[in-house]
Amino acid sequence: MREVMVIKMEQNDFSRINEMMKQKGVFLHEETGKSYYTGYEYATLYDWDQYFETIVQLYLGWDTTYARLGVEIFLDLQKENGHIQRSSKGAEEQLSEHVKPFLAQICLLIYNRDGTVDFLREQNYHYYNRLKKYLDFWLFREENFHGLAFWDSAPHTGMDTQHERAGYWFDRYCCGVDLNSYLVRECRAFALLARIFGKDEDAVFYETHAKRLADTIVDLMWNKEDGFFYDIDRRNGKQIPLRYIGVFAAMWAGIASPDMAKSMVEKYLLNPNEFNRGFIYPVMSAAMPGYSESYLPNDMGCNWRANTWIPTNYYVFEALRMYGFHKEAAHLAEETNRQVKRIGDREYYATESQTGCGLNPFWGWSLLAYFMPYENETEFDPTEIKLCVNDHIVLNK
């Protein structure tokens, strides 16, 4: 365990962000009667958003109450087969899609701040068992392709308009590199939670599954000729030749070999014809036909094309540091921080025109931009899948 490190943040940034979040971000979930935090003014609690929003809350010195209650809300909504809707409210199509695999990782953030996740063991491990059941729903669907899980649609990925790779409502064919990399991390996080409770059999099972899934990602999704990972169409087993930022989750999960990472970074991430453009990094390669700051015909949801979203920048930043690309990581951290301060707190940003898009102001995951330079300076990574109680950075207030 390292010493707690103290970093400085500009007082005006700290106060403004903290007050905005407190005044605008807390809502009550009527069905469960529990409070939760969200960055969306229309009060929807989303799945992977909550993970990144929790990191922001912890940096600002908040306790873990809203993180815990957010996890409980999702688990309270679980169906008998383990399925959980991916948002607290929404259209029928949206609610039919399973919550993204970040709940165990949120619990790990809670444990590493509090030294406990006892809420999971209350009532004879009620929430622990539900967490396990939700994870199994992802891992063991009959339609999975050689063990690879699949997205139900492009909106299900969170990268709403990337229909070229994941289709529309109920298309259910895209085995995403991003999804399966998140699942590797989620299995490892759940295994650590199992260790905390002395459930060693569960821990070994999910550790083993994480290794097996990581190997499958390399075997089936790595394209040796291109030097890049691609999603798989489970209907025919072929790779889907669309390059998007979520593929770098394979580095964030430690799946890529050093040589693979070198190819991904040098051939694609740093290439001005691919991802190294404008407000780095767009969520779709500029070499792809769908690269556009504007909506294309039949697009639905937020624009994840020629646009920059802070949570993907954030995990690409963590991935770069993991593989020793320290100069590139430092540049990404500083540039993301600079651009957000210049443009303002927005939901997302147009890559080429370098302007703000979506909700204004936005008090969700985009606020990670304020903390990236400090993580770079301190070499701290709150997303690392390990037990490290109190091993965190405390901000000067």
Image: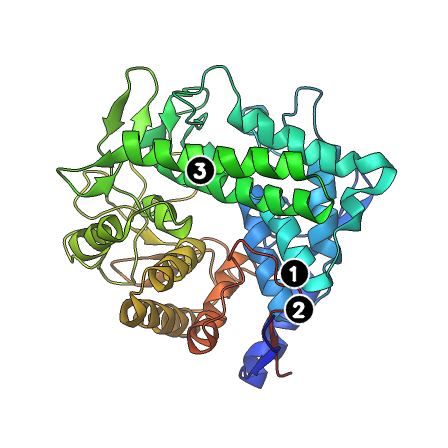
Residue 248 on image: x %, y %: 33, 49
Which residue lies under the disc numbered 1? 112
> Which picture quadrant has residue 94?
top right
Q: Which badge, 2 or 1, comes first in the chain's sequence?
A: 1
Residue 107 on image: x %, y %: 66, 49
In the shown orientation, is residue 342 left or right of residue 393? left
Give 239 or 310, whichever is nearer the viewer. Answer: 239
Q: CA distance from mark 1 to mark 3?
A: 23 Å
Q: CA distance from mark 2 to mark 1?
A: 6 Å
Give 197 or 94, whichever is nearer the viewer. Answer: 197
Neighbours of disc 1 within 10 Å: few (<14), some (14-19), many (20+): some
Q: Secondary structure at mark 2?
A: loop
CB under 8 Å between discs 2 and 1? yes
CB under 8 Å between discs 1 and 3? no
Q: Amino acid at mark 2?
A: Asn
Q: Residue at x 84, y 42 (%)?
A: 122
Which residue lies under the disc numbered 3? 211
Residue 73 on image: x %, y %: 73, 40
